[in-house]
């Protein structure tokens, strides 16, 4: 039904008008509305299967960790369905398997409309499984799903994910910066800036926002960042799995649109040395208790718990984060756990409005832009059956 409701907007794309043949299902001569609906339902659907590879930390600074390939689905399914068929890929080419036993399985776990291809085409986020159907070691989403027991769900945890990223030209220079030099001014006028001198790359940012909205993601805003050519989008507030799923689709859309705009987008935590801000993924977090009257007590209790696992959490917060968490440029040093109200030099910040209301959420400022939003890894790098919930 969801599929058919999109029919009127298809207009001239109807296959009978294009003269396409669908074997015995060909409806070329039919001009009735009913026949047109039937015909549309028969247009095959392009499903872009998206997954995370096994290259974390292995590649050069500008490469991302996302892969995708297209499956044509003869009998379309509605966007939102998780009943898309399982598929496989060559794990030896993605850092996820050895060459002599290289197949990995893609298991669809989330789907949404494909805002780039339009019509009834879809994006399909997948978990990676081993051939025997177990979660692959790079599958960081499954441990989160397994963690969502009744008592966790009861807390109605919400996340708000601030995804910063930096644009580069193909030359390897930050996008919009003069070829052999620096922007016309040091950091200051660029954050939330406007105007040709202050802002670089807005057409891509706008196209990305449009795409996220059309895909139905819980995107809550965008802004230009402190370093020119650096931007942020926010996903949330959303539930634990939802947040990660929407972030991954939003990241994929950004990379996909980068191709069209000739701009590289990177989640590298410290793309430019010197007096230039790094790129983070501040993660705002709340439980039901924190959001209710007197929630500050629950916020403080969570911060206390977080303070005891600082090192463990840092190890899960992105590769190369030590170059970003220096204690300068609105960060706390990587070796220090510090919390404070409205303090952008803290590890955990309680936003001023939250402090005034005495309830709300906390902001973990430590995760790097390249953090896996679904991951908890210990220092050995193995996925563990835990999350970074306080
Ligand atoms: P900042 O001032 O740190 O730049 P942003 O506006 O960029 O803040 O991001 C704040 C994020 O916090 C948004 O993604 C928003 O959805 C999220 N958020 C708001 N309320 C809550 C809440 N109760 N729990 C979790 N996240 C929340
Ligand atoms: Mn092949
Ligand atoms: Mn922000
Ligand atoms: Mn920011
Ligand atoms: Mn923030």
Image (cartoon, helix red, strand yellow):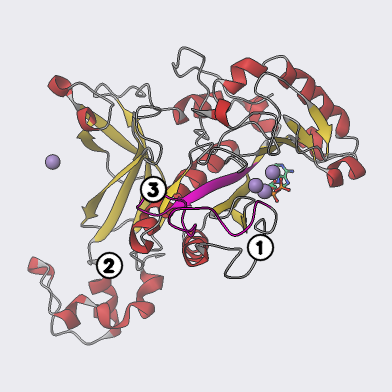
In the rendering, at what x and y percent does residue 337 appear?
73, 21
In the rendered image, the residue lying farthest to the front is: 180
Q: Are marks 3 and 1 in contact (CB under 8 Å)?
A: no
**Depth order, front residue of 370/190:** 190
In the rendering, at what x and y percent does residue 339 appear?
79, 28
Q: Is residue 313 above or below residue 118?
A: above
Q: Is residue 131 magenta?
A: no
Mark 2 element type: helix
Residue appearing at x 47%, y 51% in the figure: 174
**Depth order, front residue of 35/319:** 319
Q: Which mark is residue 41?
A: 2
Residue appearing at x 39%, y 29% in the figure: 56
Q: CA distance from mark 2 to mark 1?
A: 46 Å
Q: Which residue is mark 3?
A: 172
Sequence order check, earlier mark of 2 and 3: 2
Relative side of 120 to 360, left or right = left
Q: CA distance from mark 3 to mark 1?
A: 24 Å
Q: Which mark is residue 193?
A: 1
Mark 1 element type: loop
Q: Are marks 2 and 3 in contact (CB under 8 Å)?
A: no
Query: What's drawn in magenta, residue-wise?
Result: 160-187
In the rendering, at what x and y percent does residue 168 appear?
43, 51
């Amino acid at each position: 039904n969801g599929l058919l409701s999109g029919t009127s907007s298809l207009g001239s794309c109807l296959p009978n008008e294009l003269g396409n043949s669908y074997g015995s299902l060909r409806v070329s001569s039919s001009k009735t509305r009913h026949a047109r609906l039937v015909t549309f339902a028969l247009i095959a659907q392009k499903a872009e299967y998206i997954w995370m590879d096994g290259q974390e930390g292995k590649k050069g600074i500008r490469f991302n960790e996302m892969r995708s390939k297209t499956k044509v689905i003869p009998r379309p399914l509605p966007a939102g369905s998780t009943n898309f068929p399982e598929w496989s890929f060559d794990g030896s080419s993605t850092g996820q398997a050895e060459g002599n036993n290289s197949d990995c399985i893609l298991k669809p776990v989330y789907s949404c409309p494909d805002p780039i291809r339009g019509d009834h085409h879809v994006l399909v986020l997948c978990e990676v499984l081993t051939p025997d159907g177990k979660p692959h070691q790079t599958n960081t989403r499954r441990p989160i799903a397994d963690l969502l027991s009744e008592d966790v769900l009861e807390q109605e945890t919400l996340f708000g994910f601030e995804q910063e990223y930096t644009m580069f030209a193909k030359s390897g220079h930050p996008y919009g910066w003069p070829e052999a030099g620096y922007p016309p001014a040091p950091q200051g006028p660029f954050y939330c800036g406007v105007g040709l001198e202050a802002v670089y790359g807005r057409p891509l940012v706008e196209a990305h926002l449009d795409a996220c909205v059309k895909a139905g993601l819980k995107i809550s805003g965008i802004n230009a960042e402190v370093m020119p050519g650096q931007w942020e989008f926010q996903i949330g507030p959303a539930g634990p799995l939802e947040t990660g799923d929407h972030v991954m689709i939003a990241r994929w859309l950004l990379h996909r649109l980068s191709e069209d705009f000739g701009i590289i987008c990177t989640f590298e935590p410290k793309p430019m040395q010197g007096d230039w801000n790094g790129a983070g993924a501040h993660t705002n977090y709340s439980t039901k208790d924190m959001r209710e009257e007197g929630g500050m007590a629950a916020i403080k209790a969570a911060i206390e718990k977080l303070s005891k696992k600082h090192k463990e959490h840092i190890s899960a917060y992105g590769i190369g984060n030590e170059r970003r968490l220096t204690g300068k440029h609105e960060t706390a040093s990587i070796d220090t756990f510090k919390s404070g109200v409205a303090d952008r030099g803290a590890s955990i910040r309680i936003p001023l409005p939250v402090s005034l209301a005495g309830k709300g959420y906390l902001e973990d400022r430590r995760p790097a832009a390249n953090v896996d939003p679904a991951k908890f890894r210990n220092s050995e790098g193995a996925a563990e059956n835990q999350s970074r919930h306080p």
